[in-house]
Amino acid sequence: MRKSTFASSMRKFNLTLLSVFVAIGLSAGALAAASSKAPTPPPNSNNYDSWLNKEVRHQLVMLPFFSVFDNLAYRVDGTTVTLQGQVVRPVLKDDAAKAVKGLEGVTQVNNQIQVLPLSAFDNQLRVAEFRAIYSKPSLQMYQVRSVAPIHIIVDNGHVTLEGAVGSQADKNVAGIAANSVPNVFSVTNNLQVDNGK
């Protein structure tokens, strides 16, 4: 009897998690479909670094499977782009490299993105953290953006918040909410405060 109840609960949880991923994926996919080809770099070479930084960021946030449970970062050194961060799906790591390789002037992509381990426990924590953080009244405005700015990275029960918020108060609220989820081993709040909002 217990086994069937547990199996039923896991099926419901997996469906909930799937619906969260599908909803996030569909909205990101719609944005990606609406985007056009990357514009060519400016003829003035002094502006190339700035242009390339903007284009790399644009390509990464427009990836169809990029979600609130992934963190993508990058560094541009001349014509070499180093990709960093953590992703839930291996396909996102590959897609990120392909998107950046296609930019004019990029000669090398160093793909250091970590694929997070497959874990039902971590999946449960992802959903619980998402609900805890984005249900806070002061943080709900971030959820409706095309790319949610608070990213929830869960790795073997350890939670890291990445991204940017508009105030120190919002950063604090997100950290408190993340810490309120049961069974989390640790929470690291790396959110940046973007006062230029």
Image (cartoon, grey):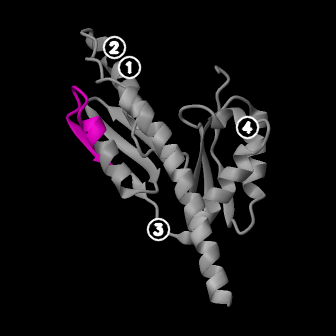
Q: Where on the picture, by quarter, is residue 135?
A: top right
Question: Disc 1 marks which residue?
Answer: 50
Spot the residue most to the bottom. Answer: 1
Q: Earlier in the sequence, mark 2 or mark 3?
A: 2
**SS under mark 4:** loop
**How far is disc 1 from disc 4 in space, using C-alphas?**
31 Å
Q: Residues within 10 Å of mark 1 (few under 14, many from 20)?
A: few
Q: Is residue 184 above or below residue 51?
A: below
Label 2's element? helix
Magenta range is: 98-111
**Residue with the mark numbered 3:** 118
Give the spatial CA distance, label 3 vs label 4: 28 Å
Where is residue 196? Give x, y as percent.
64, 19
**Earlier-in-chain disc, 1 versus 3:** 1
Residue nearer the viewer, 171 or 49: 171
**Measured from the top left, where is residue 183 in percent x and y?**
71, 69
Mark 1 or mark 3, which is nearer to you?
3
Q: CA distance from mark 2 to mark 3?
A: 41 Å
Amino acid beneath label 3:
Leu
Q: Residue flagged by tag 4: what amino acid is it?
A: Leu
Nearer mark to the viewer, of 1 and 4:
4
Q: Quadrant of the N terminus?
A: bottom right
Name the residue located 21 percent from the left edge and 26 percent from the top edge.
Answer: 105
Residue 29 visible here? yes
Q: Which residue is found at the position 31% from the left and 37% from the top? A: 81
Q: Residues within 10 Å of mark 2 (few under 14, many from 20)?
A: few
- Quadrant for residue 107, please give it: top left
Assess whether residue 175 is covered by the magenta stretch.
Answer: no
Q: Which residue is mark 4?
A: 139
